Amino acid sequence: MVEKLTISKWAREYIEKSARANASIDLEAVRAIIQKVAEAGRNGRKIFVIGNGGSASNASHFATDLGKSASDAVGKRFFILSLNDNTSWITALGNDYSYDEIFSGQLKNYANTGDLLIVLSVSGSSPNLVKAAELAKTMGLHTIALIGGKRGTISKVADTVVVVEDTHYGRVEDAEMTICHMICYALIEHPEWAD
């Protein structure tokens, strides 16, 4: 007889699957990202972060943690922008050009060679994220992608890729925020790593 699914059983299974998703994170890639972010801070490079939906919220959260808390700990300000956070920019670019250009259009104004672009995506194939990653590559930015198990087009474009081996939106977004927190808290708890 099949055990009846209860809320408690479902919640336990969710936590177990989340643990597997977190365990799939390539910690060497995370180490490389922490070093890249620290290097960008040292060299006065800009860091841009983008995502859609829940990943947009994670992008904003990450920009706040790195821009405020990590900057406070390190004693030098990180120049970080979540390109999700300017509604006027997004609506102007979406209306006048296309929704696919809401991030790439901003990068054309803000980005320079040597800057970083961090892309947060579950599918890895959102056209506006792909377009931004492709433009960033032509502009000489180092592109980092945190993506779900489908990988998508961005996994072929980005310079550094961390795959969360799950396709469930909630669990992938949770794991991506864990990676973002690891990046920030590595520098908050060990500011010497930013030197």
Image (cartoon, rainbow, N blue to C red):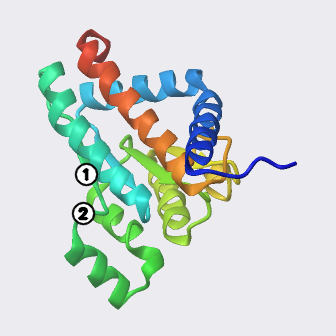
Q: Is residue 99 left or right of residue 3?
A: left
Residue 42, which numbered label?
none
Q: Quadrant of residue 179?
A: top left
Mark 1 — residue? 81
Q: Is residue 191 above or below residue 15?
A: above
| Of residues 2 and 63, the one drawn nearer to the viewer in this rendering | 2
Q: Residue at x 34, y 90 (%)?
A: 96
Q: Residue at x 41, y 25 (%)?
A: 34
Taking the view exactly as shown, the residue that stands out farthest to the right is 1
**Secondary-structure class at tag 1:** strand
Q: Could you say where residue 191 lies in the image, as x and y percent from the top left?
A: 24, 14
Q: Residue at x 53, y 44 (%)?
A: 146
| Of residues 44 and 8, the one drawn nearer to the viewer in this rendering | 8
| Of residues 44 and 18, the one drawn nearer to the viewer in this rendering | 18
Q: Tell me whether circle 1 and circle 2 mark residues in contact (CB < 8 Å).
A: yes
Local crowd at mark 1 within 10 Å, few (<14), some, or many (≥20)?
A: many
Taking the view exactly as shown, the residue that stands out farthest to the front is 1
Q: Is residue 160 visible?
A: no
Q: Could you say where residue 15 lies in the image, as x and y percent from the top left?
A: 56, 37
Q: Is residue 44 visible?
A: yes
- Which of the image's four quarters has the C terminus? top left
Q: Could you say where residue 1 lies in the image, as x and y percent from the top left?
A: 87, 48
Local crowd at mark 2 within 10 Å, few (<14), some, or many (≥20)?
A: some
Q: Amino acid at mark 1?
A: Leu
| Of residues 100 and 114, the one drawn nearer to the viewer in this rendering | 100
Mark 2 — residue? 85
Q: Is residue 92 left or right of residue 179?
A: left
Q: Could you say where residue 143 lies in the image, as x and y percent from the top left?
A: 49, 45
Question: Could you tell me how far apart the alpha carbons at marks 1 and 2 are, in whole angstroms?
Answer: 8 Å
**Which mark is nearer the camera, 1 or 2?**
2
Q: Quadrant of residue 85?
A: bottom left
